[in-house]
Image (cartoon, grey):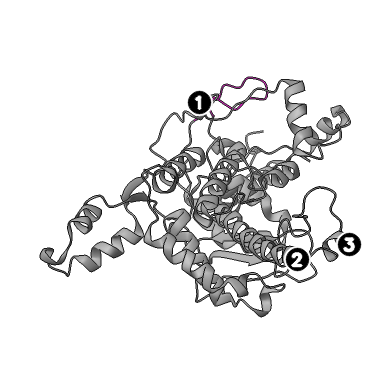
Amino acid sequence: MGKSSAAETPGAHSTVEKKRRRLHPIRRIAKFLLGGSKQKKKRDTTTDGNQEPEGKTCHGASRWQNVLPFLEPLIALDPKLSFIEDRILKRPTQSANEKARQQQRQQPKPEPPRTLRDLQQRVQDENVFCNCDECAPKYYKISTTNSHGTIRDVPSTSQRALSSTTTTQKQSFLTPSQLRNSAAAAIGPQLELRFHGTYEAMSLVRHHIAWLDATYIHPSATPTPAVKQLGALLTTWHPHLSSANLRHTLSTRQLATLFSHLNTVFFNGCIPPHNATLTAGFGYLCDTATDCFGKSSFNPLLGTQILLHPCLWRGQHTSTHGHGTTDAEKSSSSSSSSSRYTKNTTTRSITSRIATLLHEMSHAYLKAYACATCPTHASSIGPLGHGRAWQCLAAKLEHVAAVILGQPVVDLGRAPALLRDVA
C-alpha cells in the first residue's frame, strides 16, 4: 500500500499531462490576448431598460489594441476573424446557446420604416426615451477621464502659416488691420493621433461643432483664406467636377488636392492624409456599382482612403422644375429654361459630390480619433458608423457647407443612413 502513489497510476499520470497541456505558454498568451474569463474586469454599470449604461468607466485602450491596424486587412478578407477585434475592444459577445435562446424567444420584427416621416411617426407613437447627450447627459458622464485625451485649442493651420510668414517681416510694414488680425488669430482644435482613438465620441463632436460655429456661423465670422482658396479651386475645376464621368476629367491627384482643401476648411486639417508610400489614397468605384456613392476607410498605417463613384451622385434623378414635371415636358421647354436646367444640374452635381466627400471624411475623422473602447461607442458611432455622433457632425457640416458654398441645401445623406441602420 505504501508503494502505490498517485503519480504512478496511469489515470493520475494522464491527469497531470492534461494539466500541463492546459498551462502551455502559447495557450496562455492566446487566452490573455483574447481576454480570458479570469482577466475580464467587472464593469460598474447601472442599466435601466434599453437605456445607455450610467457611470461606466472607460479603461482606455489596451496594448493589444495597437495590433488592430495590422489585423484589419485580414479581418476585411475573412470577417470570421472579427471576434478577435471584439475581444480586444471588450465588446459584449453572446455565446451560441444564448443566441439560440434569443432566436427562440424572438418575436417577428415589424416592417422597418421606409421613409423618415414613418420613422418619426413610429418614434412618437411608441414614446421612445431620448438618451442623447443633451436630453440625458448623465449617461455620458464617464467616471474617469484619465484614459482619454484632452482637446487643446491652438491657432489654426492657415493662421499658423500666416504667422510663420509674417514673423520674417518687420512690424513697421504691417498695417493696423493686419496687426489686429494677427493678434486675434482664429484658434482650432488640435488632436493627438495615435494607433487608436483616445477621445470620447460625443465630446469630440460637440467640441468640433463649437469650432465650426465660431469660425463660420457666428455673425462676426468672415471668410478665411482657406475658404477663399476652396472657392477659387471649385470655380477653376467646375468643368472637371461636373462631368458625367469623373474618371475621365478628375485625376486621383486632383482628388487628393480637393481632400486637402476640404480637410483644412471643415476639419482644421485634423484628418490624417493617406500614406503615399503604401497606397494611392484616392480612387473611383466601379462604374456599374449602384449600392453607394462613395466608400472610405482609415487605418493608422495606410491613412485615409476614399473611393468616389465616378458617375452617380445623390439627387441625380430629382427634378428641378417643380412637382409633376416629366422628361417630355423638360425636352419641350424653351432654350432658356433648358440652359437654366443644365446649369442647375451641374451645380447640384458638384455640391452633391462635395457632400459625398464630406460624408466619407467625417467617417475617417471619427474612426481616427473616437475611443473604440468607450461604453458609449455603440450608440455614438454604431455598427455602420452612422450613430449619434456622426449624425450630429453631419448635420452641422451640412449647415456650414451651405454657407460656404452658397447653396440652399447640402445633403450628406443623413436620412438614408439612418433608415439603413434601423432596417
> Going from the N terminus, do you reach mark 1 or mark 2 first?
1
Q: Against 81, is 105 above or below?
A: above
Foreground residue among 18 and 6? 18
- The CA span between labels 2 and 3 is 12 Å
Q: Residue at x 50, y 46 (%)?
A: 370
Tell me the kind of residue under disc 2: Ser
Label 3 element class: helix
Foreground residue among 250 and 282? 250
Foreground residue among 252 and 108? 252
**Residue highlighted by disc 2:** 338
> Going from the N terminus, do you reach mark 2 or mark 3 first?
3
**Residue highlighted by disc 1:** 137
Q: Residue at x 61, y 45 (%)?
A: 87
Q: Residue at x 24, y 62 (%)?
A: 163
The quarter of the rendered structure image containing the C terminus is: top right
Kindly indicate whether the residue at mark 2 contacts the one at mark 1 (C-beta within 8 angstroms): no
Does residue 182 appear in this view?
yes
Q: For residue 290, which quarter of the picture? A: bottom right
Q: Is residue 265 left or right of residue 91?
A: left
Tell me the kind of residue under disc 3: Ala
Expressed as whole percent of the image width and height from the top left, the position of residue 367 reads 54, 52
Segment tinted magenta in the rendering: 43-56
- Residue 328 bears which disc, if any? 3
